[in-house]
Image (cartoon, helix red, strand yellow):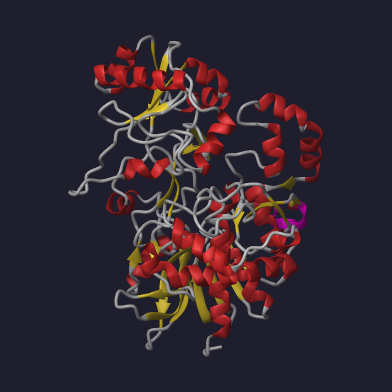
Amino acid sequence: MEGTTDIIVVGSGAAALTAALTAASAGKSVRVIEKTDKLGGTSAMSGGMTWLPGNHYAQAAGVEDSFDEALAYMRAASPIGWQETEDDLWKSQLRNGPEMLKLVEALSPLRFRLTPVPDPFQECVGAKSTRILSVEPLSKKILGPLRKKVRRSTIPQRLTYHETVAAKLDRQPIRGTLKFLPTLIRRWLTDSMAQGNGLITGLLKGCIDAGCMFELSTRAIALKVDAAGVVKGVEVERDGRRHTYKARSGVVLATGGFEWDSKMLATYFPSEIDFKSSPSSNEGDGHKMAQAIGATFAHMDQGNIVIQPPTKYEGKLHGLPLRIHAEPDAIIVDKSGNRFASEYEFWVYDRIMDRDDDGGLIHQPAWVISHWPMIKRTPLIWWYRRYQPGWLLKANSLEELAAKTGLPSGALRKTVERFNAFARTGIDEDYQRGSSCFYEKSVASSVGLMAEIKKPPYVAYRFRPSLLGTKGGVRTNEYGQALRADGSIIPGLYCAGNVMASPTGARTPSQVGTTIGPYMTWGYICARSILKDNRL
């Protein structure tokens, strides 16, 4: 029957394509269903950085990294209480990650490069500096007719991570572009991409060669379950018509997060959201389908949270994933006008989600406070502010800035004056900024420790959470199988990526790449689980 395959994968990001490639390479027929007319999901829009402990690139460089070290690090770096529920998943992820990487490279043109980005919690046992990989460039021409179907990003992706760092595009976009102009021209002529587009190009090529089928502009709307309670297919909608695709062996949901569904966001992530930088098709479709047949959720208040400037994408206001708060002459204050953390703290973004005993947000609305020299030094902030008038506030005095932000005038002035005194002495007496740990010291070494905020006009923008993607979803076991609230397995249903309850929440064990690498691994785990299932 034309509508029947061994396995159906819903979604087309890195987790989905890794699952499809793994299953198809074992001789199984695989159908990939994508809601939009573009392939790659959030992964295609990302920097493509990949956190993989125990990878063979580190081994080739002579750096040892064992399973035990990686597990010890995850246990030490994770929030209190997470080990109790996530330990089995961590073990599965760490065991399968190196195998996944070798399989992907064996079956696709993807190649990676070791990056000098250390684990942020270097004080923790098992921390390493060799776990993050970047994607090497690939020409999209290898995809044939699907070449133009790879989702474009809001960030430039012609250059690799190493080239982007060397170009200093965040500080010197024009000079950096000119420095790499020959490389950019060559990549443009060959339609070669790195980062997220390069990652998806490589995975897609592997899937095409393995015989995977792709159904674009096809929205999955319901899971089909047989009399025995086994998931056996997916009902879809395309061109206003409904159709059912059947799966002999299993369905893998890899549909992304729910950040673009306002009702789900209000229910599970009750906070003001500034911008979202994922595809607007991430509306929790997989979550809803799984919940409809009894799946239970976990970690629904978790997300990949950053602070972003505005941009436009496909006609909608989006966020641009840049670090825009860690500057020597910038501080973060809460609604009281006072600082509440070191601005250089790793994942300080999550601190704005702190709640009191009644569930109320303690710090919001919070603001980044600085002055015009910071804006002149960071041209990307200056440029992207134009996409939303009023996003960046300017004032000739701190009192005027307080009036525009709604902050207490006296408290704001006192906070700025106190910080300026710290800047003069080089010691942050309140939060030990830039000196309390390895990560803060590395940020201070990179951008500078502290500088006075004293040259008007003064500026402010909201330190409000923006979402790269939600990270809560269907609770799964260590095999990627979807679970009910009582812990029982929903046979035939597997989840990977942001539709699953991520084993690592907002406070990640890596500076970057803690979605791509692990989610590719979970796609691999799901496919391997299906291949080992007795129903095959």
* Residue bounds of the magenta highlight: 141-147
Residue pictured at 76% horizontal, 36% vertical: 184
Q: Indicate the position of residue 35 as horizontal and vertical percent values.
A: 51, 58
Compared with residue 123, is residue 75 higher up or lower down, i.e. above or below? below
Is residue 232 or residue 217 the one in the foreground?
Answer: 232
Compared with residue 427, is residue 205 higher up or lower down, i.e. above or below? below
Is residue 9 or residue 423 the one in the foreground?
Answer: 423
Q: Indicate the position of residue 108 as horizontal and vertical percent values.
A: 73, 64
Is residue 301 or residue 374 the one in the foreground?
Answer: 374
Q: Indicate the position of residue 240 as horizontal and vertical percent values.
A: 46, 60
Q: Please say whether residue 142 is one of the residues in the magenta stretch.
A: yes
Is residue 109 or residue 408 the one in the foreground?
Answer: 408
Q: Indicate the position of residue 31 as horizontal and vertical percent values.
A: 59, 71
Residue pictured at 50% horizontal, 74% vertical: 251
Where residue 96 sits, quadrant-wise, is bottom right
Q: Is residue 57 left or right of residue 421?
A: right
Residue pictured at 58% horizontal, 47% vertical: 45
Q: Is residue 2 left or right of residue 178?
A: left
Picture quarter with the C terminus: bottom right
Compared with residue 98, is residue 26 higher up or lower down, i.e. above or below? below
Query: Does residue 238 appear in this view?
Result: no
Picture quarter with the N terminus: bottom right
Q: Please say whether residue 228 is one of the residues in the magenta stretch.
A: no
Query: Does residue 143 appear in this view?
Result: yes
Q: How many marks?
A: 0
Residue pictured at 67% horizontal, 44% vertical: 161
Magenta segment's dominant SS is helix
